[in-house]
Amino acid sequence: MTFWHVLLIFLLGIGVALYEAPKLVRQKMKGELIAFSGFLLFGVALALAMALGLPVPNPTRAVEWIFGPIARLLYSG
Amino acid sequence: MSIEKGRISRRQATFLVSNTILASVVLISPALLAKEAGQDAWIAVIIAGIGGVLIGNLIVSLGLRYPNKNLVEYSMDLLGPWLGRVIGVLLGLFFLYLNGYVIRSFGSLLVASVMPETPLVIFSILIVVLASYGVYLGLEVFARVNEIIFPISVLLSLVIVAMALPEMDFNQLRPVFEHSFPHMLRGTVILTTFYAEGAFFSMVIPYLRRPREARPVVYEVNAWLAVAMIANIVGVIALFGPEETGRMIFPSFELAKTVHLSIFLERIDSLVVGIWVATVGLKVTVLYYVSVLTFAQSFNLQTYRPLVLPTAFILAALSILEFSDTIQVRIFLSRFLPPFTITVLFGIPLILYFIALIRKKGVTGGEKKNEDETSQT
C-alpha cells in the first residue's frame, strides 16, 4: 500500500512541475521559479514523510507549548 | 503593480467575510459555547459581536490609511522591507495552519456523519483540489460563486431551525444570567476567535471596487453573524438543553436530524451536509487564497499562481498532521486556538496601527481621498 501512495505523490509532484515550470521558464520569471520549486519540494517532502510514517514535527505541539501558560490561566477555574 | 487584478463589490465582500466566519462558527461553536456559558450562550453571542466590531474597525482603520495596499504591502512600508516580509511569511504560515483545522473539521464531519468507511485523507485531498481550482481562477471568481451560495445557505439554515420549532422547549433557556460572568466571557472569547478569522479582510480591502466601503462591510458582516448565530444557538439549546448540547460535537447537525414534516420530508441532515460542504469549500478557498497571496507578496512575486498547486500538497498533509483525533481538535479549538488567533490577527494589526499613528504614515483622510480617486477614473 505504502508503495502506491509514495508513487502517487511522486507522480502528482512531477505532474505539477511539468504543468507550471515550463510557463515560468518561458516567461523568464526567475523569482517565481525559485519560490515554486521551494514550495513544491517542501510539499512533496512533507506528503512523502507522512505517507512513509516518518516522525514529522507537529506544529500543533509548538502552538500548545507557546500558548499553554495563557490557556491554563484562562481555563483554570 | 498589484498582484490581484480582480475587483469585488461591497456585497461580495460582505458575503465573503460572513461566509468565511459562519462556515466554522455554525457547526463547531454551539457545542463549545454551550459548554462554557450554558443556556446563556446567546448573551455570549451578543458580547462577541462587540469584539467583532472592534477587530473589524481596527482592520478597516488600518487598511484605509493605505487604501490601495494590502496588509503585507503596508507592513513593508511601516516596518521596512525585511521585517515587513517576516510579518508576511508569518501570516501566510498562520493562514495555512488555520486552513488545516478547517479542512480537518470538514473531513471529520463527513466521516462521522455520512461516510464512516472512507479515510479522512480522501476528503482532505478532494476539498484541497477543489479549493486550489478556485484559487487559481482568482478572487473575483470565488467571490461571485459565494455571492450565490451564501444567501442560500443562510436561508436554508434558518428554515431548518424554524422547522424544528414544534419540538423546542424555550423554558430550557431559563434561568437567564445563571452562569457567572467569567464563564460567559470564556464563551465570548471562543466566539470572538472565530470572528477574528474575518481579519483576512485586511488582505482584500484594496481589491474592493471602492475601498472606503470597507467600514460598512464590517457592520453588515456583524449583522449577518448575529442573526445566523442567535437563531442557531437558541434553536439548539431550546431543542436539546444546555448540558446535552455541550456534550455533542456538531449540535446544528443533530438539530437537522430531528427535523421532519410528517412523512413527506425526512433526513434533512444530508441537506445540511450539502450546505456545509459548499460553505466550508469556499472558506478553505478564501484562506488558501489569502495565504498564497501573502506568500507571493512577501517574496515580491508578480503573480501568486505558481504557488497554488505546490501549496495543495502542504495543506493536505497539514490537515492530517495537525491533530490526532476529533477530540483533540475540540480541545485545541476551545483552549489553544483563542489566544493564538487573537495574538496573530488582533496583535499584528494593532501594532501596525500604532506604528502608523506614531510615524504618521499613510493617508489620514483615506476614506475621503479615495472617493476622489475613484470619481476621477
Image (spheres, helix red, strand yellow):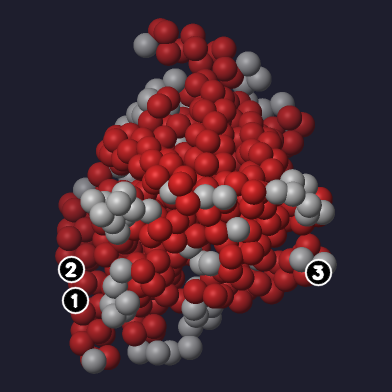
Contact between labelled residues 3 and 2, with CB atoms less than 8 Å apart? no
Along the line of sight, the residue nearer the viewer: B96 or B192: B192
Give the residue pinned by disc 1. A11
Check the image and report above or below for B49 versus B210.
Answer: below
N-terminal of the pair, mark 2 or mark 3, is: 2
The three-letter amino acid code for the residue at tag 3 is Ser
Gap between marks 2 and 3, in whole Å?
51 Å
Query: Residue B168 got which mark?
Result: none
Q: Amino acid at mark 2?
A: Gly
Q: Are marks 2 and 1 on the same chain?
A: yes
**Residue at left offset 58%, top offset 69%:** B247
Residue A44 appears in the rendering: no
> Which residue corresponds to mark 2?
A15
| Residue B297 percent across, percent down from the top left | 45, 46
> On the rendered structure, is A48 left or right of B218?
left
Residue B180: give x, y in percent of width and height: 82, 54
Can the viewer see residue B318 in this picture? yes
Secondary structure under the numbered disc 2 in the rendered image: helix
Mark 3 sits on what residue?
A76
